[in-house]
Amino acid sequence: MKSKKEVVSIPVQLLSFFESVLRLKSVKRAGWVSKAGISNAESVSDHTYSMCAMGMILSDMLGLDTERVMKMIIIHDLSESIIGDYMPNEITREKKRLEEGKAMSCILYQLPSVARSSYEMIWQEYQANKTRAAKFVHKLDKLEMAIQSIQYINQGYSSKALLQFFASARRSLGKFDIDNKNLGSDIMVGILHDLEVNIIKQKGYEKNVPR
């Protein structure tokens, strides 16, 4: 039986965890602000929610463990509630992983022990990026960024500045093989291809996409 002291302390720990989650609402996605000049850019929390909605459907379509995928998406940027959103090359990859690891250790320590180890394993799986679920979440991160870049263009922001984000996603996801009838893991590449054909080329933005 748990002691009275332990029972009382658990809600306090959870409140600290919830506060970490809520702080993501105030953390702007740095790339949109710095590279695209969008002062009222989406928050990390906005980005995570979009990934959840997209990942929920795509994971089901691909036959993945959707519950695990959703948990991984929800915590994948949670460390940014402490360290903020670094842009690529702002600090070394090694230093970023170290800071993320320390931040996540602090955040997950706020969870009751019965749940903590499970989420630590999911976080480590995401970081290692070797399982189907982890690779899916990493790719989805890029796809959501590409779709968001198009949305900002449609809102009137600079296509030249924003299409560098689309190009970055395309480089990460790879080239779409239109003759490949098996969508499989290429479904996200196919979505990116459709965006390029139906929006970027039709509106004459193609010349602004970095190669």
Image (cartoon, grey):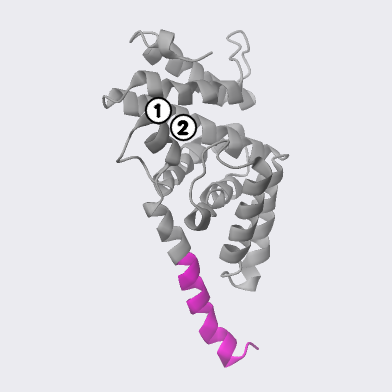
Question: Badge 2, how many Cα within 10 Å: few under 14, some, many 20+?
Answer: some
Amino acid at pointer 2:
Met
* Numbered-mark total: 2
Q: Is residue 137 left or right of residue 45?
A: right
Across and down, in percent, residue 209 comes to 46, 14
Look at the image and tell me in which quarter the N terminus lies. bottom right
- 27 is within the stretch colored magenta: no
Q: Residue furthest bottom?
A: 4
Asked which quadrant contains residue 107, the reply is bottom right
Q: Say which element carries label 1.
A: helix
Q: Say which element carries label 2.
A: helix
Amino acid at pointer 1:
Ser
Instruction: Work out whether 167 lies above or below 34.
Output: above
Instruction: Work out whether 139 lies above or below 2.
Output: above
Asked which quadrant contains residue 115, the reply is bottom right
Closer to the camera in the image, 165 or 49: 165
Residue at horizontal 49%, vertical 46%? Answer: 85
Question: What residue does disc 1 label?
Answer: 149
Across and down, in percent, residue 131 comes to 71, 40
- 12 is within the stretch colored magenta: yes
Q: Are marks 2 and 1 in contact (CB under 8 Å)?
A: yes
Residue at horizontal 51%, vertical 20%? Answer: 167
Question: What residue does disc 2 label?
Answer: 145
Instruction: Work out whether 130 lies above or below 187.
Output: below
- The secondary structure making up most of the magenta span is helix
Q: Which range is magenta? A: 1-18
Q: CA distance from mark 2 to mark 1?
A: 6 Å
